[in-house]
Amino acid sequence: MKLQRIRVEQLRQFREPLEITGLAPGINLFTGPNESGKSTLVRAIRAAFFERFKSGSIDDLQPWGDSSASPSVQLAFDWQGERWELSKSFLKRKRCDLTIAGRRYSEEEAEEQLSGLLGYQYPSRGASKTEHWGIPGLLWIEQGSGQDIHESITHAGDYLKSALGESLGEVASSTGDELIGQVTRERAQLLTATGRPANDYAKAIQQHAGCQEQLDSLSRDISTYRDLVDQLETLRQLQHEDATRPWERYHQQAEQATARLAEVQGWLQAQARARLELQHVTESQRLCRDQLASFAKQQGDLEQRARDRQKAIEALDSQETRRAGTESRLAQAKSAYQAADRACRQTRQLEHRHRLDSELRQLDLDLAQTEETLKQARTLQAQQREQQAQLHGNRVDTAMLTQLRKLGQQLAELDIAQQAIATRLHFDLLPAQHILLGDESLTGEGQRLLMEPADLDIPGIGKLKIQPGGEDIADLARRRRIAQDKLTAQLNEAQAESLSHAEELGERHRGLREDIRRGELLLGSLAASGIDDLLGRQASGMQRRQALQQQLADLPRPTGADVSLAIAESRLETAREQLQAAEQGVSHFERDHSLASQAVKTAQEEWQKLNDALQAPDRRQRETELSGQLVELRAREAALQESVIRHQKQIEAAQPDILRQDVQRFTRTAETLEQEARQRSLELASLRSKLETLGASGLEEQHAELTLQLRHIGRRRDQLEHRAAALDLLLNLLKTRRQALTQRIQAPLQRHLNHYLQLLFPQSHLEVDEDLQPRLLVRETHGRETQDDFAALSFGAREQMGLISRLAYADLLKEAGRPTLIILDDALVHSDPQRLAHMKRILFDAGQRHQILLFTCHPDNWRDLGVVATTLQSLKPSNHSRPSNH
């Protein structure tokens, strides 16, 4: 079976049609993020096969928020050289059509064809469930269900057994079953199905465990009693030591360490004050030195200010020498610009004259064309009036002609109806013979239609009265007269002699309208806004011509020395640039001259300010005071440094950190000793109470009695244990023998399982039970054989074994000539990279024999699968219209 095309519409998020074509015969990989539509496509395929088209319990197929939608799925696939095409619609438009190589099936018949091909069944009512899915339910893995295979195999079991071609029921009814049943029943008296003790065996184990527990409890009580006696003696000895109150000595030592630490704290505070004062003295010295250095620097700055002032005066003199040349260049540039400007204006007037001459020539041509157009428009307008008059006289328009045709058709239909029900009189008379039909004499051979009662006179014989049958013919005659009257009245209104004449009038009416329409179009092309507009344009053109002639008269005429406007404007631009350069030169000169003047003024002010500061009367006194203050500060600094060093030596000798530790150590020691003394007093009272209680219980006697009872129960338990083990061993041997027989019968399935399993676990095999369920994985691990129950495998391993089992079942079905299609929705997401690499080899191998649709949201995991991935985002909604149902 090879799926060729999938098309869905109005199904969940696919409101618009989505179509997938060109599916490969092997692996087809579809990728996309979560909620991109992968599971929706899988659901669509399941609905196409599993859900009855009449079902009303599949609202999950509707697009979200659209209760009026009709979800539809179309599939096309090949099977045994024939093309199968399925079209299925649900809910609002319920329909199912199936075409097989040209043979068509509909509704329930089409659904039965599908279920018989793939091996599944439909529910009697409601939505389809797993128990109905059969073979597709086994081969189509839903998201997150790859590890759950037992239920799928159970529902597909009958089809798989049919594919095996062997009756497994014969194995179940062999003679060995009676012995296995007997051993199983006797084993069940002692063990459960999982091998746990039951009935008398379980009771014996429970009694033995209970007795052993009581004995252990007594042993613990005896041991506890002895330990309590030893503890009591120890506590009494320690209580004699507590009477001397040793913790008070440690309290005194803690107080002494605290007093010494307070003295050291005073030294630390005095040292901190001295360091702070030393910092202030150091900062004051720095300020005095900076002030004295500033006084020394001011004299050097005064000499530099004098040199800067002289340089500024020399720069100002240099600027004065540039004034005359700059002003002369500006005057020359202004004169040249004015001359170029006059020449350019004259050239523009000449250019304007040329443009007006050209416009006048074009205007003359336009006036001549307007005159010709006006003449043609007037001719067309006269034709329009004549055609309108003819059209007004012809009343047979399209509507009237349609009505006449309808009346004519109605009259013809009534004539046909009359002829169909009228009485037909056929006559074939002998030569020279005649009969009378009313007033008409009939001779020879012929036929008459009788619509009304008539008399038939046969000479020499008599008269026949012929009455046409039924009321219908009379009614038809009345209706025909009414239709004839309406047609006649309508023809009179149309001034037509007949229907064919009306047809001619209608054709003439249509031709006139066409001529009028063509005339209107032609007139519109000549005079879109009417003849009055043409006349207005002609008048405006004449006025414009007169204005142009007046403007030309006011403009100068060209001479032989005229240059082009481009040359004149180029010369003007050159003169303008030269003038601009000269103006910029003047501007730069004035700016530089102003800056030089300002520099002279600023240099003079700075020199004068600094000179005034140096000549101030209190400057020398302030300098002397700063020198004396600096000497005092140096002496104070030395005294403070000595004080800081002295306090530091005292503090280091006292070791304040060690003193703090001593306070903590002595205090905690005292508190601990005192607390232990109180605790021992309480423990001593408690021990005395416990010993009194245990001493009166007779523990040794109870221990001896329980020891004898435990031995008796142990012998009973051992006997039952040996019997249970023997029965269990016998049952396992019988089942092993039966399993060997079953494996021979199931050899085809086992062969396919082992083929795939070797690619994942070399030298291993997967056992199946008689119901074709995976039961036991046997493999080599670290050089030794291990056996793992399928249910005990990890989640990822069960998912891998489940996929391998499904592929083996698919191979088995293919060998049996049954169709296979494998769908994997986000499978193997719990496999580690190494296992996943092996599973990809397995899938690629299976893809050589089966078509596989693999949907995943992890495209990177499948990049090396050897197939081109199709992203769901790249699939555009189909623009084709919905195909019709067959």
Image: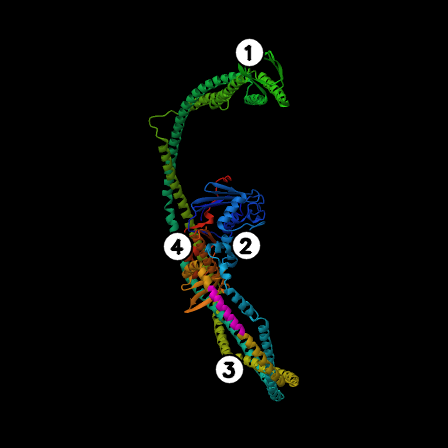
Q: Nearer the viewer, residue 302 or 26?
A: 26
Instruction: Confirm whether residue 489 shows in the render.
Output: yes
What separation in Å lies between label 2 and label 1 (alpha carbons)? 91 Å
Specify few, some or many for label 2: CA neighbours under 10 Å numbering under 14, 14-19, or 20 or more. Answer: some
Question: In the image shown, does 272 or 853 lie closer to the viewer?
Answer: 853
Q: Earlier in the sequence, mark 4 or mark 2?
A: 2
Query: On the image, numbered disc 3 is attached to which residue?
Result: 653
**Which numbered dot is residue 310?**
4
Tag in front: 4 or 2:
2
Q: Using the image, determine if residue 804 lies above or below residue 669.
A: above
Distance between mark 4 and mark 1 Cα atoms? 164 Å
Q: Earlier in the sequence, mark 3 or mark 2?
A: 2
Sooner in the amino-acid sequence: mark 2 or mark 1: 2
The type of residue carrying mark 2 is Glu
Q: How crowded is mark 4: few (under 14 residues within 10 Å), some or many (20 or more)?
A: few
3D distance between C-alphas at marks 4 and 2:
113 Å
Which of label 3 and label 1 is nearer to you? 1
Q: Which of marks 3 and 2 is in front?
A: 2
Q: Reading the chain from its start, which is encountered first: label 4 or label 3?
A: 4
Question: In the picture shown, does residue 5 fall above or below 394?
Answer: below
When the figure is inspected, residue 104 is found, relative to residue 207, above or below; the finding is above
Answer with mark 3 or mark 1, whichever residue precedes in sequence: 1
What predominant SS class does the magenta segment belong to? Answer: helix
Residue linked to disc 2? 131
**Residue in front for this viewpoint, 312 or 251:** 251
Magenta span covers which residues? 723-739
Q: Disc 1 marks which residue?
A: 433
Mark 4 vs mark 3, CA separation in Å: 70 Å
Q: Residues within 10 Å of mark 3 (few under 14, many from 20)?
A: few
Which corner quadrant of the image does residue 364 belong to? top left
Amino acid tagged 3: Ala
Badge 4 or badge 1: first in the primary sequence: 4
